[in-house]
Image (cartoon, rainbow, N blue to C red):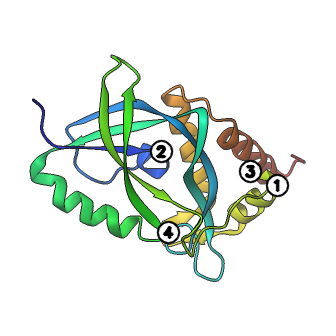
Amino acid sequence: MRSGLWIFGYGSLVWRPAFPYRERHAAAIDGWERRFYQGSPDHRGVPARPGRVVTLLPAPGRRCVGVIYRVDDDDVDETLRALDVREQGGYDRVFVDALRTEGGEVVSALLYRATPENPNYLGPASIEVIASRVLESVGPSGPNVEYVLRLAEALRAIDADDPHVYELERVVRSRLSGSRA
C-alpha cells in the first residue's frame, strides 16, 4: 500500500506546486467547477487592490480537471505548513475523491477551496470585469496576468476543458495586444 498524502491542485498548484512530491498525474473531480471568484490580497494583488484567483464551486454534473500530487509521509507536515501559508487568504482544506485520468485510479485527495463566506471572496462577475481586475493587479507573487496565462497553458497541457479559464485568457490576451475582446 502506498503511503503519503494526495493533494489536488486546480489553480497555481497545477503549474507551480513548490513542494516536494513523489508522483504527479492529471486528475479530475466530479461535481465542481473552477471560477475566478476569489480575491488575492497577498499573492496576486494587494489589500487595496486584490487580484482574482480561482476557487471551486459545487456544480452537479460538471468535472474539474487538475493535477494530483503524492507527497511522501516525511514531507507531509512541512508541505501542509507551506500550503497553509500560501492558501491563507480564505481557503479551507477539504478532501475529495480524485480520479486519475490515465489508469482510472480514484484517490482521496486534499484540496484547498475558498468559500463565499471568507473575507476575500469577490464572487461572480462578468469575464470583462474579471479581466479588468486581472490586468491591473500585481502582488508579491507577481502580476495577476501571469496567473491567468500560466493556468490556461497548464490546463491545455493536461487536456482540461475549462471554458471559463480559456475565455478569460482570450479577453486578457486581447486587451494586452490592444485589440477589442
Check the image and report above or below for 33 versus 113. above
Q: Which residue is mark 4?
A: 43
Of the numbered discs 4 and 1, the one sitting upstream in the chain is 4
| Residue 68: x %, y % from top left | 35, 38
Of the numbered discs 4 and 3, the one sitting upstream in the chain is 4
| Amino acid type assigned to the residue bearing label 4 in the image | His
| Residue 80: x %, y % from top left | 26, 60
Dot 4 and dot 1 residues touching (CB under 8 Å):
no
Q: Which residue is mark 1?
A: 128
Check the image and report above or below for 118 versus 63. below
Apparent side of residue 33 relative to residue 26 in the rendered image (left or right): right
Of the numbered discs 3 and 1, the one sitting upstream in the chain is 1
Query: Crowdedness of circle 3 by 10 Å Cα count: few (<14), some, many (20+)?
Result: many
Residue at image x 41%, y 49%? 13
| Amino acid type assigned to the residue bearing label 2 in the image | Tyr
Element on which disc 2 rests: loop
Give residue 59's quadrant in the image: top right
Distance from Cα at disc 2 to Cα at disc 1:
22 Å
**In front here: 82 or 2?**
2
Element on which disc 1 rests: helix
Distance from Cα at disc 4 to Cα at disc 1:
22 Å
Check the image and report above or below for 113 versus 46. above
- Please identify, in this view, whether the residue under mark 4 or under mark 2 is nearer the observer: 2
Q: Which residue is mark 2?
A: 10
Dot 2 and dot 1 residues touching (CB under 8 Å):
no
Apparent side of residue 121 relative to residue 16 in the rendered image (left or right): right
The furthest residue to the bottom: 48
